Image (spheres, rainbow, N blue to C red):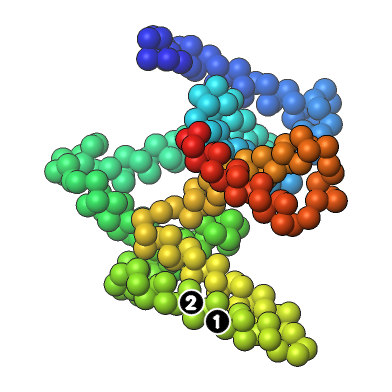
Amino acid sequence: MTASQPAVSAPEMLEQLDRIIEIMRRLRDPETGCPWDVEQDFASITPYTIEEAYEVADAVQRGNVDDIRDELGDLLLQVVFQSRIAEEAGLFSLADVARGISDKMVERHPHVFGDEARPEARQQSRRWEDIKAAERARRGQTGVLDDVAAGLPPMLRALKLQKRAARVGFDWSDIDPVIDKLHEETSELRDELAQAPVDHAKIEDEVGDILFVAVNLARQAGVDPETALMKCNRKFESRFRYIEQQVEKDGKDLKNTSLEVMEFHWQAAKSALKAAS
């Protein structure tokens, strides 16, 4: 939908939601449905849910509105799919999912749905965390790190753990000590790599420390580490494809190209892509 297009009417929206719910019901029908869809359960379908969420993020990074719409549709399908599995087991329905998130949003925004004063964005962020902490306490989760899902992607979980700890003062006051810590962890990795024989468990531990500090560094710099890494991945792809193209133009095979030649093209790619941006 573009800015010039009229908003979708409520009946049309409900019609399309009913349609996807009915499609999923038929796909999951044990007698006439799709065999693959029928055999799925919470555990087997969850990796696809995670994948679709990342594909939404990728589409947003690329700024392609059509792709964003399509990927959001794929993610919505996952919500409908998981809800259908639950409904068949007599656990909950899609209506329960929608009701639960609606109630939660109303509770977490008393300045919109209640009579509290409208806060600044930063104040609201703190208020949001206070409300979520109260929700966790009602569930008996009183630990600072309680309810940080173990199934989150490691980088995202590291960020959430750090934010939780920072809320109670366990945090650096500025970014300089984090940079120092990164140097410290890198030095410790060098020391372990210099050992003979190398202890791979210790190497893994030191690399983990470096990655955890890197997430903290991004947080202190006000940068989302996952977004930064996605952009870095895209940059690497562009530059490496440039190397491939240049080697191909020279009539050579990349596998038989020296590192020095590839590095030359890499630097050229940096200049070319910087000039194009």
In the image, what residue occupies the spot 33% across and 59% down?
134
Question: Where residue 180 sits: x, y (%)?
Answer: 42, 77
Instruction: State whether residue 79 is above or below residue 257.
Output: above
Question: Where residue 53 sits: x, y (%)?
Answer: 57, 40
Quarter of the image where one finds residue 110 = top left
Question: Where residue 178 sits: x, y (%)?
Answer: 40, 72
Query: The residue under label 2 is which amino acid type?
Result: His
Q: Is residue 97 visible?
A: no
Instruction: State whether residue 48 is above or below residue 13.
Output: below
In the image, what residue occupies the spot 67% across and 79% down?
203
Q: Say which of 25 and 206 sits in front.
A: 206
Question: Mark 2 and mark 1: span between their CA atoms?
Answer: 6 Å
Check disc 2: other Cα within 10 Å, few if <14, some if 14-19, many if 20+: some
Query: The residue under label 1 is which amino acid type?
Result: Ser
Question: Where residue 50 sits: x, y (%)?
Answer: 62, 45
Q: Is residue 72 left or right of residue 117?
A: right
Q: Secondary structure at mark 1?
A: helix
The label shown at residue 258 is none
Instruction: State whether residue 189 is above or below residue 87.
Output: below
Q: Is residue 20 visible?
A: yes
Residue tagged 2: 183
Quarter of the image where one finds residue 176 = bottom left
Check disc 1: other Cα within 10 Å, few if <14, some if 14-19, many if 20+: few
In the image, what residue occupies the spot 85% across and 51% down?
256
Residue reaching furthest to the bottom: 196
Q: Secondary structure at mark 2?
A: helix
Residue tagged 1: 187
